[in-house]
Image (cartoon, rainbow, N blue to C red):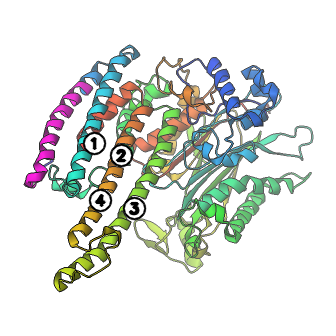
């Protein structure tokens, strides 16, 4: 793990020079969570700290209780892993690599409730969640990014957020010394994820936070989209189920890496009909007049018409690759792939002047727990795309992940 | 908006008079806010903006204090206000605006200003208005929104429970009037068993509901302002000005 963790959540300190706030807020964080610290983290310079102490740094950022998560960078569930899980509040996290040895992805993430009354989106980011063991000499880190847009209730999306990367990791590791067969790996992972959701026994503690309170039969009518991207040094593997989407920005043009599963997509329509189902137009095309997507994790009552099988794309990375955008339909309903790419690449290229004093966020320092970055371009891109979706009257939850693909490109 | 103002009952007139005076003040403030938003060029005049915002918020507080006072005297009049249009009436939530509307308003106004300056924003040259909400601000707003929705739901739920109690008692009351039987029990803690006191009891509950709703409205307004920078707050208050009643 390497890099400066630059999540900006709860607060940002745009108003003050990055260097000083970085230290100050780190100190603050430590005061808040004294038990999690390794003592030397406090005296290291931010850069040094960032490079060598990613784990600690992440721990520092992690809320010590679920209640904290609202003003912290990462959600409470992230504490067991060096990743970002989020649901319910804006989380914004960027990471930037420090050139040498390890490759650390830069990313930014924003997830907001927007104009909906319930938050059903969930985002999961796990940099370096697993190693490709078959590449003995390199043993490269690979990164996990996932966006899950729940429907009916949020619990399936939450479960995906908490479990998906673990399942994928197990599946990758099961290849041992052999080269990973990605398509099969992702298909197996989706199948297992769906199975877990089905078999999920009600846990009283979890159900309390759940709108549907996990009551069957409502529980059967709950599901989630899943768009999962695995970024390796030379490939981007995207597996998708539902109408969230992954788009690659390459050399200025937008290349969709997933194709939405809508019930009126000709091949999907055919598949549903062959399975004996129907697509009924009720406020748009819906499977049995109910669900406006043709594949999803969960939704037991709509099986076998609605299936959890992903479509997998494997894309070789090129040096012209600029960024990868994963988002829920809260973004894609109102922003085209091209516009999203345009906005994201401009943010990544922008040379930003230092923020003027008194600009947004100057009050943030008081709240503690802020994180900051020397390069928050990805975070800015994700937040700007989110704001653009809200500006264009998106009525849904909006979740956006932007991954910078430029600098963590390994020499071929 | 064309308003169909109903003729006020005599005892309602007092609040209506107050409201009209308050609106005049509110309008003066609105003019000041608009002027401030147009003149604002640097953060140097933040102090004067802050004092303006403070005055506007005090005017809102003044309004809610007055409303609470009148509410204690005639809660029913406050819950079906004669000083707004029937159209607005139809959209009322416990005698006023839904607290969550503050966020829709913010996103709306922010959206207008964002589209307006997308290119500048990408280059980091934002004007500092509502289009320029920082990650931290968006995060805090989202957090506040979730909290507000929760509180709004709680109040709604309480109101529903309170409304449901009316069925029992009003049935009893009716029974009461028809039978003339003073021995009819069932008013519970409301005491005497007379319709009047039952009504009073219901009204007490309504007063509490109104109080909680107004409290949430004012708190939400203040909390949003608290997250915004002075010039953003000015833009927000301009957008919010005609909304409140």
* CB-based contact (under 8 Å), mark 3 and mark 4: no
* CB-based contact (under 8 Å), mark 4 and mark 2: no
Farthest residue in the top direction?
B44
Label 1 SS: helix
Question: What residue lies at 16% left-to-right and 46% top-to-bottom?
Answer: B15
Q: CA distance from mark 1 to mark 3?
A: 21 Å
Range of residues picked out in magenta: B4-33
Say which chain tag 1 marks: B
Q: Residue under label 4, please give it.
A: B204
* Disc 2 with disc 3 on a shared chain: yes
Q: Residue under label 2, please give it.
A: B215
Mark 1 closeness class: few <14, some 14–19, many ≥20 residues within 10 Å:
some
The answer to whether residue A320 is seen in the rendering is no
* The C terminus of chain A lies in quadrant: top right
Q: CA distance from mark 3 to mark 4?
A: 13 Å
- Residue B156 placement: quadrant: bottom left
Question: What residue lies at 74% left-to-right and 60% top-to-bottom?
Answer: A189
Q: Position of residue B130 (x, y in %)?
A: 39, 32
Say which chain tag 2 marks: B
Sequence-wise first label, 4 or 2 = 4
* Residue B158 image label: 3
Position of A243 with respect to A191 (left or right) is left
* Disc 1 with disc 3 on a shared chain: yes
* Disc 4 with disc 2 on a shared chain: yes
């Amino acid at each position: 793990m390497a890099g400066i963790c630059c999540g900006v959540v709860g607060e940002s300190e745009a108003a003050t020079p990055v260097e000083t706030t970085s230290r100050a807020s780190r100190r603050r964080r430590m005061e808040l969570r004294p038990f999690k610290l390794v003592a030397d983290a406090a005296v290291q310079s931010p850069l040094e700290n960032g490079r060598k102490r990613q784990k600690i740094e992440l721990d520092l950022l992690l809320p010590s209780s679920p209640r904290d998560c609202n003003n912290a960078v990462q959600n409470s569930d992230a504490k067991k892993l060096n990743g970002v899980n989020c649901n319910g509040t804006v989380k914004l996290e960027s990471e930037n690599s420090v050139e040498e040895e390890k490759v650390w992805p830069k990313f930014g993430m924003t997830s907001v409730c927007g104009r909906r009354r319930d938050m059903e989106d969930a985002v999961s980011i796990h940099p370096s969640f697993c190693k490709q063991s078959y590449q003995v000499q390199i043993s490269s880190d690979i990164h996990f990014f996932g966006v899950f847009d729940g429907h009916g209730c949020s619990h399936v999306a939450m479960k995906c957020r908490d479990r998906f990367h673990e399942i994928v990791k197990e599946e990758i590791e099961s290849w041992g010394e052999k080269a990973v067969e990605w398509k099969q790996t992702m298909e197996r992972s989706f199948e297992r994820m769906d199975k877990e959701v089905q078999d999920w026994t009600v846990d009283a503690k979890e159900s309390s936070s759940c709108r549907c309170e996990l009551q069957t039969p409502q529980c059967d009518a709950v599901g989630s989209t899943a768009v999962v991207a695995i970024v390796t040094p030379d490939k981007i593997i995207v597996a998708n189920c539902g109408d969230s989407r992954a788009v690659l920005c390459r050399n200025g043009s937008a290349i969709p890496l997933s194709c939405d599963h809508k019930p009126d997509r000709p091949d999907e329509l055919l598949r549903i009909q062959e399975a004996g189902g129907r697509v009924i137009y009720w406020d748009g095309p819906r499977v049995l007049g109910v669900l406006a997507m043709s594949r999803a994790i969960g939704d037991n009552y709509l099986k076998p018409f609605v299936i959890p099988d992903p479509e997998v794309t494997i894309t070789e990375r090129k040096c012209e690759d600029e960024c990868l955008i994963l988002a829920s339909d809260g973004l894609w309903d109102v922003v085209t792939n091209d516009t999203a790419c345009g906005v994201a690449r401009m943010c990544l290229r922008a040379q930003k002047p230092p923020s003027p004093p008194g600009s947004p966020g100057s009050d943030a320092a008081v709240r503690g727990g802020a994180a900051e970055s020397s390069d928050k371009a990805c975070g800015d891109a994700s937040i700007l795309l989110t704001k653009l979706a809200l500006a264009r009257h998106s009525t849904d939850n909006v979740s956006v992940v932007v991954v910078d693909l430029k600098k963590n490109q390994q020499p071929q | 908006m064309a308003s169909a103002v109903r003729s006020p009952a005599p005892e309602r007139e007092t609040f209506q008079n107050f409201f009209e005076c308050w609106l005049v003040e509110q309008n003066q403030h609105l003019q000041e806010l608009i002027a401030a938003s147009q003149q604002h060029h640097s953060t140097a005049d933040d102090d004067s903006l802050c004092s303006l915002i403070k005055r506007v918020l005090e005017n809102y507080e003044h309004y809610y204090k007055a409303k609470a006072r009148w509410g204690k005297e005639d809660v029913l009049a406050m819950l079906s206000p004669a000083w707004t249009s029937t159209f607005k009436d139809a959209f009322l939530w416990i005698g006023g605006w839904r607290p969550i509307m503050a966020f829709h308003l913010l996103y709306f106004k922010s959206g207008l200003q964002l589209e307006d300056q997308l290119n500048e924003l990408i280059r980091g040259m934002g004007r500092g208005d509502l289009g320029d909400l920082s990650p931290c601000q968006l995060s805090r707003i989202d957090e506040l929104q979730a909290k507000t929705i929760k509180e709004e739901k709680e109040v709604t739920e309480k109101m529903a429970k309170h409304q449901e109690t009316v069925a029992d008692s009003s049935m009893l009351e009716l029974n009461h009037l028809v039978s003339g039987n003073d021995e009819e029990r069932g008013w519970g803690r409301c005491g005497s068993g007379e319709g009047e006191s039952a009504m009073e009891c219901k009204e007490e509950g309504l007063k509490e509901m109104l109080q909680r709703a107004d409290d949430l409205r004012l708190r939400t307004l203040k909390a949003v302002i608290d997250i915004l920078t002075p010039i953003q707050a000015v833009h927000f208050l301009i957008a919010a000005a005609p909304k409140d009643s």
